[in-house]
Amino acid sequence: MTNEREQKTILVLGGTGKTGRRIVERLRRRGVPARVGSRSAQQPFDWTDQATWAPLLRDIDTVYVSYYPDLAVPGAPETVGAFTELAVASGVSRLVLLSGRGEEEAQVTEGLVQSSGVEWTILRSSWFSQNFSEDYLLEPVRGGEVVLPVGTVPEPFVDADDIAEVAVAALTGNGHAGQLYELTGPRLLTFGEAIAEISTATGRSIDFVQVSPGQYADALTAEGVPVGVVELLTYLFTTVLDGRNGHLADGVQRALGRAPRDFADYAADTAATGVWDQE
């Protein structure tokens, strides 16, 4: 029997991002109407412009909440909290929040969603594998040298496809309300080991170089990266990647009843697309 909730339109904020577009694709393949919330959508959504929120919430009762650039940035709890209040007042009865594993600041926003009075699910995710292929690390990988301010701290890289599948389950199915899923991959890797696996998958020599946080911030600033982004990246590498996330969690298994995807499989499949080929 088809779940009645699946027949209603689901709002996917960040619907063109790494997790959001995967969620939209999966929902539509299942015949579930999905409304994309992004600044580039036909009816735009902008976290910095509250006037864009209400139109997107019309006739919506389920929302995937992905905040840009990150729940750890100043003002995120206030913004997401205001959106949550409006969503509930507009008739939304289920919220699925993408959060960051090991980010104490993000937990403030989690608490606001958890106390909203409607069904909620928290997806507390570790570092995305796809950051190497769909984000700012793509060009360094292509160029053969990845420079980061992180050493031998292990991280359980999680595949964005796994996050999307857990999100779809929580958005459309039963049994996920009130659950906080910590989403990780099946093993721990340092960034150097991850780059080595990408190197093996591509058949190319790709070096990993560790620098100090100050050197990293200076290099980003010299490239014209905005101050806020530099501060966020420095925070992620120096605070979140301090070893606090150096253990596995069972969120994918609990939500989907299967093991998470391994980084080696991600690297092999991504290499086969040619996205990491030198230009």
Image: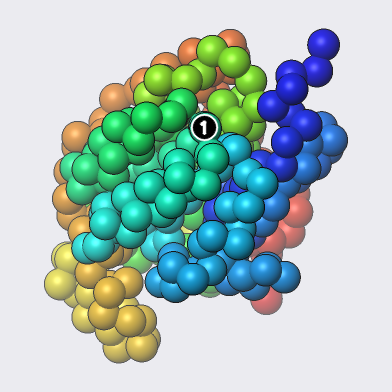
Q: Is residue 165 above or below residue 220?
A: above
Left or right: residue 37 compared with residue 102? right
Q: Nearer the viewer, residue 146 or 186?
A: 186
Quadrant assignment, res 17: bottom right
Q: Nearer the viewer, residue 239 or 268?
A: 239
Quadrant location of the N terminus?
top right
**Residue 192 on image: x %, y %:** 37, 48
**Residue 258 on image: x %, y %:** 59, 14
Report the label total: 1
Quadrant location of the C terminus?
bottom right
Residue appearing at x 17%, y 50% in the figure = 239
**Residue 49 on image: x %, y %:** 44, 73
Left or right: residue 260 compared with residue 172? left
**Residue 175 on image: x %, y %:** 54, 13
Residue appearing at x 58%, y 11% in the figure = 257
Colouring method of the image? rainbow
- Is residue 23 visible in the rendered image? The answer is no
Residue appearing at x 35%, y 81% in the figure = 225
Left or right: residue 47 compared with residue 229? right
Residue appearing at x 71%, y 42% in the figure = 9
Say few, some or many: other residues with alpha carbon within 10 Å of mark 1 (under 14 / 14 to 19 / 20 or more): many
Q: Nearer the viewer, residue 52 or 18?
A: 52
Q: Is residue 211 above or below residue 64?
A: below
Q: Nearer the viewer, residue 226 or 51?
A: 51
- Is residue 58 visible in the rendered image? The answer is yes
Q: Is residue 199 above or below residue 4?
A: below
The kind of secondary structure element at disc 1 is strand
Q: Amino acid at mark 1?
A: Arg
Residue placed under numbered mark 1 in the picture: 94
